[in-house]
Image (tube, grey):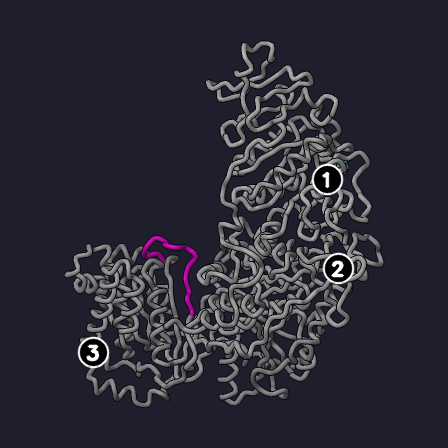
Amino acid sequence: MSETAQAAKRQGADKAPPLVVRFAGDSGDGIQLAGYEFAKSTAEARSDFMTFPDFPAEIRAPTGTLFGVSAFQIQFGADEVLTPGDRADVLIAFNPAALATNLPNLKPGGVLIVDDSHFDARGLKKAKLETNPLEDGSLEGFQLIAVDVVKRTLEALDPLDLGRKRATRAKNFWVLGLVYWMFGRPLEATQDWLKSKFKKAPEVAEANITALKAGNAYGETLEISATPNLTAPRVARRRDNSRIMSGGQAMALGLAAVAALGKRDIVYCSYPITPASTLLHALARLEGGVRIFQAEDEIAAATAAIGASFAGSLGVTASSGPGLSLKTEAIGLAIAVELPLLVIDVQRGGPSTGMPTKPEQSDLTMAIHGRHGEAPCPVLAPATPDDCFAIMIEAARIAIETMSPVIVLSDAYLANAASDWEIPDIDTIPDLLWPEISPEEGDFQPFTRDVLTLARPWAAPGTQGLAHRIGGLEKAQGSGHISYDPANHAEMTRTRAAKISRLADRLPAIELEDGAQDGDILVIGWGSTHGSIAQAVKELNGEGARVSHVHLRHLWPLPRGLEALIRCFPHAVTAELNTGQLSSILRGEYLAPVTCISQVNGQPFHVSDLKAEIRKHLEAPSS
Amino acid sequence: MNELPLKPNDFGTDQEVRWCPGCGDYAILKAMKTVLADIGRSPDEIVFIAGIGCAARFPYYLSTYGFHTIHGRAAAVATGVKLANPDLDVWVVGGDGDFMSIGGNHTLHALRRNVDLNLLLFNNAIYGLTKGQYSPTSPIGTRSPSTPGGSTDQPVNPVRFALGAGAKFVARAADTLQTHLPVVLKRAHENKGASFVEILQNCLVYNDGAFGAINDRSQSHEATVRLEHGSPMIYGKDEDKGLVFDNATGAFEMTLLADLASKDALAIHDETNLVRALALAALEQPDFPVPLGVIYAADAPEFIEARGIAGTKSKWGRTELKALLSPPA
Ligand code: SF4
């Protein structure tokens, strides 16, 4: 394509709809790396974007297999981009298995770039394909660009004399170069990054840069004039003060902020588990401020965090579903002794080991109700990767203010999805205040209570004159001495519950995200589904529907005003990546007929699916 | 608050002690108060963390900070306490169920990490609080409600376990030996790192006499050998018996001093010798005297210190936070 043609295409790009690009290949092909570099380049190009790394649990599954396919999807555009997109405009498939598993993710008529180097009998068999899709006509509805990427990478790298195996590894950068060409992206930033990343192995940097340039140059030889407008939207949508950020990284920074704003180190205790480990790694890289403890198991992680809180720090522990199950006894202890504790659950498909890398919102009921005895605690969920930062600070404040564990429900999508993150202005965030405590006359009473919050005083070991004993046995209100008195147990049980429910009085009033109070249907979401629901509602309303959206950040206690809001609408429906856990809770709490749009396929909602489901609910007889 | 220096009784609380009368735990509590008074630190800077079981009620009876946690997890809780505030003196108390069964994993890791904790295992070889089931330290043949025909599983030897876990301070004492126990507890406290002390404790109700003569003060000298670093291993009421080390078998053997040509043949206790420590750990009643005292003590980096963690304040403030948040140049 000539430069003028490209320039012509770019004109009016600000009107262009957002685009979706999906990379798919073996988990060892460097798909996530290529995708992440593309996201960075998107940020540089000043487009808004959202990514979705969709990878298997196996680290390096046997090459070419269907279960070893790793994918990375990104949507970018001139307007605010809320989701990684439903189906792709451009799909890059590195092998037959990637093609077979990912073709359903490509729009009809979309551009399909295929590395055809593995489409021999062996490759097809591994992908369980009976015929070669490149030849059997099954790809006719797409704009196919089949190119032997391996061969071309090897040719380009031939002068470097790296040997076949090492040279082949650069193929992801060859493809990235080609994709950069498609969207008119400059190569410099990626080249610079490669140079600094492989400072100690300059030959690796050189190989990847050579491949990147070769793939880019190959684009010039392509005849893709028949393609739709692939020019990236180039409006300066991107905020000036922003950086690319995943939810996991944002959470790590949020915890750093808790330490910095409280001027006290916090203690982060965890045991490696997918997908929560990304948080551990991100924190470990920050060095300082957060004392990191990689415990021997999930229980030790939770109990060490409780020990840290007992000693006057804030204990934080993170895990995923199976780990949360193991931590539940410890969370019960923190509730009984009334110590602050931050518990982060990066939810994944369950039950049991389930689908370790795939998102699901199926731990909500466990977070709210899943402990023995009457053991309520606040439960929060961030809505977007951005929000993962702020919610850490809020959860820490709540934990300290209520002297209670707080559970924060993230998920595999939020943890890994990256977007253009507006760097928070920390001058607007108040200090995190630790309760002051001073020696008192007479015996210290660790279970007296603040009249407003019902929280007990927190006297950490080391505080002069306040030595006292606490434990999991029932305590007498006030003195905290062991007590099996029936009336006291009833009072303590109700006090612990009231302490949590009173928190709702201090939380911001519930507000609609979109739509009006007299709309035809209320869609209730929570957590990571925010982007999909917001986009679906926006589009439906653009098409003339009257849909309203409320998104719950505080799941327990439920926000004040939610019941009244639900009753304003003829239809109320939750949209959840589970089989209806929030809708059950809302029905139980309010006796309101809240129905549910449910999805449990280990993927975020597609906007198109949500729209169709919401329309179905609109047409149902009103309740 | 009482004025320093405190006396042993200043470390008591107004809580009614709920152990069975005659329980060995009373003796350990008494020794502990003596040791705390002797150490001389303010109770406000001392923390006792316990799991669940009879032994684990210990913190309620001391005027220090205390935390009665959940079964088996005391060592993990204590590790968190140290991470948050390394300046505290932290003691961990538990029974054989706590330390060797449900919490075995935490014992292992606290020891191998060498966290500066004093871990006191009150070993009574039975589950007391749940009414007398056999425990992981009960000898084969123990009849209990859950093993009416006698237990058949091999018990764990806590000292060997600790040495195997890489503990750098391992000692053993007995509840009733009130001149010996405080000395061992003090040594444990002086050690910077994880100090593991097995205290043989008599459960009067469910396992009376489990340790035979060891904690019977009148016979103890026949059933135990008191270890002193650099001293020959001599025992017996009349100091007429001793241990020699057989280099060929790598094991200790008993001997009558009268049978030795010279006292020089007696084994000399060397706390820093791991091989000897393992051989000592193998000595059990009734064939051998049970070694009491510091069995092994070696220098090693302490967990918190090695991590460069100190105090409670954060190195981070708003300036550092801004730098973390802003994009890399
Ligand atoms: S049951 Fe045994 S160990 Fe427990 S308090 Fe009674 S005597 Fe002591």
Residue A90 lies in the magenta-colored region: no
Label ID, residue B34 = 1
Q: Magenta stretch?
A: A52-66
Secondary structure category for the residue under label 3: loop
Asked if labels 1 and 2 touch by Cβ distance under 8 angstroms, the answer is no
Label 1 crowding class (10 Å Cα cut-off): few <14, some 14-19, many 20+? many
Amino acid at dot 2: Pro
Mark 3 and mark 2 on one chain = yes
Residue A60 lies in the magenta-colored region: yes
Asked if labels 1 and 3 touch by Cβ distance under 8 angstroms, the answer is no
Label 2: chain letter = A
Residue A160 position (above or below residue A542) = above
Q: Which residue is mark 3?
A: A223
How far apart are labels 2 and 1 at the CA level?
27 Å
Name the quadrant of the C terminus of chain B: bottom left
Label ID, residue A446 = 2
Return the residue nearer the eye: A396 or A228: A396
